[in-house]
Image: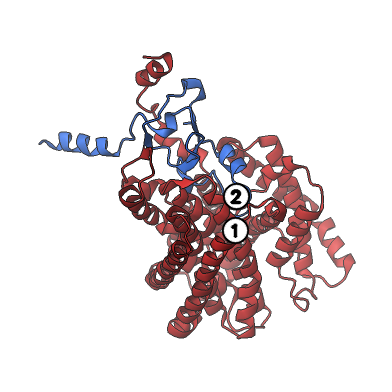
Chain colours: A red, B blue
């Protein structure tokens, strides 16, 4: 018996506490700690008569340059404090997750500075006239900078799309009543499940018909039907895909997701869909969380400007219910089922594993726990508040500042999407995978429209009204 | 069967096999390695996310698979080089 085998046999059991390591080494859990931490601090300050609003600074509406400059002069200390606090919080998480800390901090500095520019541009009183919605500015700006300017690659460590968007989603939870999630959740799950299963089956069937490997077909299907890149890598691992399969799915998901960031909000606006209906369609037919929030927030901006009926929060709420509650949380079940099928029917020569139910929790997107807890915390913390008190106290001192911090986190994510989407570096998808995935996109968009507009239109229109 | 025995047997079914990919010298399972191998992954995904669990790359079979998979070609990594 070799020394290596002896070493292995002597230490066969996992080291004590290794199952708990995930709590400080996974992005999802750090989104929970940071997001919930901010919510708890915000609530504590609210209870003491103060507010986190001082830290949740953002440019106010302006029409002339001197106004904007005056705003930054008067609030310089607030911006410095906000930058320092966010840098410190994200850096602690980054260090324990395992990002290279120095490079993360350097990348975060750039992200923050660009975010200030995005916020300032969006606050221009002519921004709406030119459809300069913050997510679109961030995405387009990031794409231009990332693809045309020679940024040092070391800065990539700070462009953590998923880390920022998950933290933002936990903060979003604090602004959604838990009763809304319970009430609307079943409808969101029904709509999302039907469309997801149909989309997966279409992509899988077309892919297999075109002669593609079943494991690639499943990886493509999950990417298009469940939750984008996250689903593609989860299912790829669950079905023991070939090494070259996940990059193909990643390429197709990212490219189509970027297209949908622009197409879905603009199509919804052309049809004058109410905010909640547009948000539901985006939640059903977008692929990745970050891309979907960019589209939903854009549509919310259209609603806020009066271009479409409804409120900005309705668009984001409907999107979140469909995408996070209706699709994201089920990835573990998809992985378990497809793993079972792969093990029993697509056995890869030389490797094997039994499918086990532990997949469901291991792959569960833990940030959803934070989202639900944040919602429950705030819902329980401000019960039975009179409408006048809610508008005069709770909303400006607790809810709006959390919403502002959430928007900062989302903007970090949207910028990061653009900065990390280097078109030259994506793996070529090939014609057949493109056809299979695109077939699913068509079905997904059409079914998403039917469910969101025709079947449940009045439901989503009245969401959180 | 006592309750304790039942719980022990149930936990044994959940325990990952000892001779598994995550402990093999051919397995590359660190998040940074996976992100480096999959171009564009960071644009809308992350290898540091819960959904990846412990998945990684088998350099012997050119597969992307769970660290809990098993294989006849298993070769134990040294403790210092283990990915887990």
Residue A134 location, quadrant? bottom right
Foreground mark, 2 or 1?
1
> SS class of the residue under badge 1?
loop
Task: Report x, y in % for residue A241.
Answer: 46, 48
Q: Contact (CB < 8 A) between labels 2 and 1?
A: no
Task: Report x, y in % for residue A302.
Answer: 66, 77
Left or right for B12, reference A122: left
- Chain hosting mark 1: A
As measured in the structure, the alpha-carbon distance from the residue carrying label 2 to the one carrying label 1 is 18 Å
Q: Residues within 10 Å of mark 1 (few under 14, many from 20)?
A: few
Above or below, comparing residue A349 to residue A171 in the picture: above
Q: Residues within 10 Å of mark 2 (few under 14, many from 20)?
A: many
- Chain hosting mark 2: B
> SS class of the residue under badge 2?
helix
Given the current orientation, which residue lies at the most extreme right position?
A: A66
Above or below, comparing residue A397 to residue A299 in the picture: above
Left or right for A424, reference A62: left
Q: Residue at x 70, y 50 (%)?
A: A82
Q: Residue at x 64, y 61 (%)?
A: A407
Task: Report x, y in % for residue A271.
Answer: 60, 86
Query: Would you name the residue on which mark 2 appears?
Result: B41
Residue B5 location, quadrant? top left
Which quadrant: the N terminus of chain A?
top left
Query: Would you name the residue on which mark 1 appears?
Result: A430
Left or right for A145, reference A163: right
Q: Residue at x 41, y 49 (%)?
A: A239
Given the current orientation, which residue lies at the most extreme left position?
A: B1
Q: Is residue A184 visible?
A: yes
């Amino acid at each position: 018996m070799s020394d290596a085998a002896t070493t292995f046999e002597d230490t066969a059991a996992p080291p004590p506490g290794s199952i708990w390591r995930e709590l400080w080494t996974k992005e999802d859990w750090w989104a929970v700690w940071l997001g919930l931490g901010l919510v708890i601090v915000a609530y504590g300050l609210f209870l003491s008569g103060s507010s986190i609003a001082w830290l949740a600074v953002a440019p106010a509406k302006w029409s002339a340059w001197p106004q904007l400059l005056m705003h930054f002069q008067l609030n310089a200390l607030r911006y410095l404090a906000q930058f320092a606090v966010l840098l410190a919080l994200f850096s602690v998480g980054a260090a324990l997750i395992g990002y290279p800390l120095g490079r993360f901090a350097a990348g975060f500095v750039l992200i923050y500075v660009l975010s200030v520019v995005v916020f300032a541009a969006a606050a221009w009183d002519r921004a709406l006239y030119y459809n300069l919605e913050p997510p679109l500015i961030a995405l387009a700006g990031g794409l231009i900078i990332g693809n045309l300017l020679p940024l040092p690659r070391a800065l990539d460590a700070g462009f953590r799309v998923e880390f920022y968007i998950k933290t933002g989603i936990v903060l979003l939870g604090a602004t959604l009543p838990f009763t809304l999630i319970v009430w609307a959740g079943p409808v969101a799950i029904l709509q999302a499940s039907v469309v997801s299963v149909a989309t997966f089956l279409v992509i899988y069937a077309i892919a297999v018909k075109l002669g593609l490997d079943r494991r690639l077909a499943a990886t493509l299907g999950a990417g298009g039907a469940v939750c984008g890149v996250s689903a593609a890598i989860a299912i790829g691992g669950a079905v023991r895909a070939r090494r070259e399969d996940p990059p193909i799915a990643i390429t197709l998901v990212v490219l189509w997701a970027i297209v949908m960031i622009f197409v879905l909000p603009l199509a919804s606006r052309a049809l004058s869909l109410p905010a909640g209906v547009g948000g539901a369609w985006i939640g059903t037919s977008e692929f990745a969380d970050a891309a979907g929030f960019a589209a939903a927030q854009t549509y919310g901006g259209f609603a806020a400007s009066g271009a479409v009926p409804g409120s900005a929060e309705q668009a984001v709420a409907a999107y979140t219910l469909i995408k996070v509650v209706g699709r994201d949380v089920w990835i573990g079940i998809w992985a378990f089922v497809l793993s079972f099928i792969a093990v029993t029917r697509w056995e890869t020569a030389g490797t094997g594993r039994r499918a086990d139910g532990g997949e469901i929790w291991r792959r569960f997107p833990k940030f959803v726990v934070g989202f639900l807890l944040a919602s429950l915390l705030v819902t329980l913390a401000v019960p039975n508040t009179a409408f006048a008190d809610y508008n005069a106290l709770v909303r400006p001192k607790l809810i709006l500042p959390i919403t502002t911090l959430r928007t900062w986190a989302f903007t970090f994510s949207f910028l990061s999407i653009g900065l990390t989407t280097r078109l030259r570096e994506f793996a070529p998808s090939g014609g057949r995978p493109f056809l299979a995935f695109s077939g699913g996109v068509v079905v997904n968009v059409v079914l998403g429209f039917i469910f969101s507009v025709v079947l449940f239109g009045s439901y989503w229109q009245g969401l959180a009204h | 069967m006592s309750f304790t025995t039942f719980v022990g047997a149930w936990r044994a079914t959940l325990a990952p096999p000892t001779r598994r990919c995550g402990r093999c010298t051919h397995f590359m399972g660190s998040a940074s390695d996976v992100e480096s191998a999959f171009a564009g992954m960071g644009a809308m995904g992350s290898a540091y996310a819960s959904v990846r669990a412990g998945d990684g790359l088998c350099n012997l079979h050119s597969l992307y698979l769970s660290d809990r998979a098993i294989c006849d070609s298993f070769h134990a990594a040294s403790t210092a080089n283990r990915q887990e």
